[in-house]
Amino acid sequence: MLQVSDSARGTSLLILNEAYSEREATQLVTHSWLGLFLNATGAGRIVPIDLALGQRGVGCADDAVVVDLRSKPDGALYAISSSVLRPGAITTVGTDYPVSLSPGGASEVNLLLGQRRYTLRLEGVKADLTDARVTLSDGQQTQLLFAPDGFVDDPHFTLDWAGDMDRDGRLDLIATLSHKYSVFPTRLLLSSLARQKQLLGVAATLERTAC
């Protein structure tokens, strides 16, 4: 089971219909959220939503109670808290998500948004991935999105979604790039928050761990 840490402070991205500690969930439902909706063809929209508490269950610890969070209206994949985003239609690049980056599989993903071509790439030559780097390039600039901080333990890298969410004509991502097999740091990365000589900036975050 994946479970978000027991603190609502700093959580600005939610994956809906997953388990959250009951104490945190009761705080999260009082906040304002935008929901990311995608249909079967990948067409997307951002809509204001309310959160509702779902079924209760047992979490990672024996005395931990968790609930799933659902959107009203129903069907949002993510709930996002960000002052950058506005309701309306968004563009999705491709429809087959998530995409796992690995040396033995897809180590490179090409993403075409309008006339702009981007490449998300896993780099490194060591079998244990201690030198792993994840970069994003638009052919002119390259930004480092992940590099080990001196410790890795079966790291994993997943592209959860790609497209134009802030509607500025440039690529945005939702990605989970982790140094450890049991840690799942998911980030919404928006082009409109990029600093000088960067392609993306962090707009919303979610930290989860496996039991």
Image: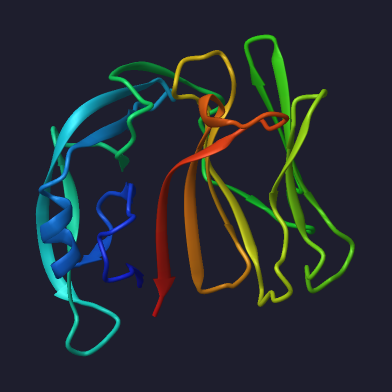
Q: Name the residue: 19% across, 64% down.
A: 24
Q: From the viewer's perspective, is 204 left or right of 199?
A: left
- Percent across and percent down for residue 57 are 15, 73
Q: Name the residue: 25% across, 33% down.
A: 34
Q: Quadrant of the C terminus?
A: bottom left
Q: Nearer the viewer, residue 197 or 115?
A: 197
Q: Nearer the viewer, residue 186 or 191?
A: 191
- Percent across and percent down for residue 164 are 50, 22
Q: Nearer the viewer, residue 103 or 146?
A: 146
Q: Is residue 107 above or below residue 90?
A: below
Give the quadrant of residue 38.
top left
Q: From the viewer's perspective, is 159 left or right of 206?
A: right
Q: Is residue 78 above or below residue 194?
A: below
- Percent across and percent down for residue 169 are 56, 13
Q: Which residue is the extreme one toward the right?
A: 125
- Percent across and percent down for residue 63 are 17, 88
Q: Is residue 91 above or below residue 127?
A: above
Q: From the viewer's perspective, is 63 left or right of 149?
A: left
Q: Tell me the colour scheme of the image.
A: rainbow
Q: Which residue is the extreme one toward the bottom?
A: 62
Q: Name the residue: 48% across, 63% down.
A: 184
Q: How many marks?
A: 0
Q: Which residue is the extreme one toward the front?
A: 196
Q: Quadrant of the N terminus?
A: bottom left
Q: Name the residue: 76% across, 55% down.
A: 133
